[in-house]
Image (cartoon, helix red, strand yellow):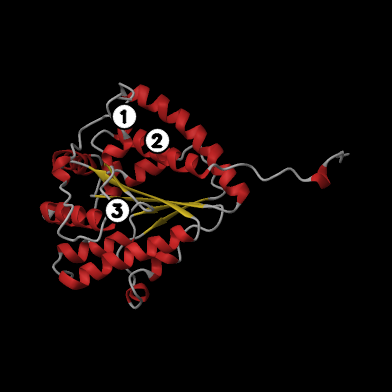
Amino acid sequence: MAKSARLDDFRIPFFDGDKAGKRVSLADFDAGAKPFSAGSKQADRERLAEYAVKLDEMQERLHAQRRERVLLILQGMDTSGKDGTIRAVFHEVDPLGLRIASFRAPTPDEAAHDFLWRVHRQTPAAGELTIFNRSHYEDVLVPRVMGELHGAELERRYAHIRHFESLLADSGTAILKCFLHISKDEQRERLQARIDDETKHWKFDRSDLEAREHWDKYQSAYAQALAATSTERAPWYVIPADSKSHRNVMVAALLLRVFEGLKLEYPPAKESLKGITVT
């Protein structure tokens, strides 16, 4: 890991209530940077393997204790690696106590409720680590880019999100939000790879190309959303994601820091079990 790089260098400044204050530009973050790389893809994989074992132990303590909750939110442009991050970072974690929730376009039933209704139902229970593959942030991104949400209503949604995440934090949920920052050139290569490889056609959707046509608008929408919703209890981090191995290492390092901050321990030994011999 580069000595000069700190995880908090990639944290979005906390929202302070001043809409005209802190601005965020994703152009200030190099999607191709690898500040937390171990030096090579193989070295990154080895480091990730170490982190994965530690995450498994931490998650087991979380599940055994059944008191705290952990929520990891992954957002990013198409092909930024949300699915790949989940596969790589959590491959050692016991599925017991781990849950993944994905959010696509709202169903008619979901659209008939407030935009947070479908999300609140998927938040982690006590002792659970939950990963959001996309999230409630879709509802301040897509509608904004499409011109359906702006002005006062957009600001209200940002406020609802801040209050919602504050409620989760008050209820014992540790929240980590990662924006997987991919460059437009890297996205083009990954999309083309899906088209050229027949075994990857199932991953490709023409809507990905439509979204790409609005690249600049999405970058602006993300920047605004990150600035308006990064808080001390639910911070946003920008993860340089052109390198898949670096992306995975950085997300794992951040999540380990969250777990370590919880100071998790196994439940106390049961006095009633002492001296029992199984025959």
Marker disc for residue 36: 1
- At label 2, the amino acid type is Ala
Pointer 3 residue: 230
Q: Does residue 223 sit above or below 164 in this rendering?
A: above
- Who's the residue at 24% across and 63% down the image? 140
Residue 62: where, in percent of width, then height?
56, 47
Report which quarter residue 139 is drawn in: bottom left
Residue name at image x 29 percent, y 66 percent: 159
Q: Earlier in the sequence, mark 2 or mark 3?
A: 3
Going by the image, does 7 lie left or right of 24? Answer: right
In 3D space, how far apart are the residues under numbered discs 2 and 3 (Cα atoms)?
A: 19 Å
| Circle 3 residues within 10 Å: few <14, some 14–19, many ≥20 | many
**Compared with residue 68, is residue 9 higher up or lower down, i.e. above or below?**
above
Residue 133: horizontal and vertical position, in percent? 36, 53
Classify mark 2: helix, strand or loop. Answer: helix
Q: Residue at x 34, y 58 (%)?
A: 135
Q: Nearer the viewer, residue 221 or 9?
A: 9
Q: Under tag 3, what secondary structure?
A: loop
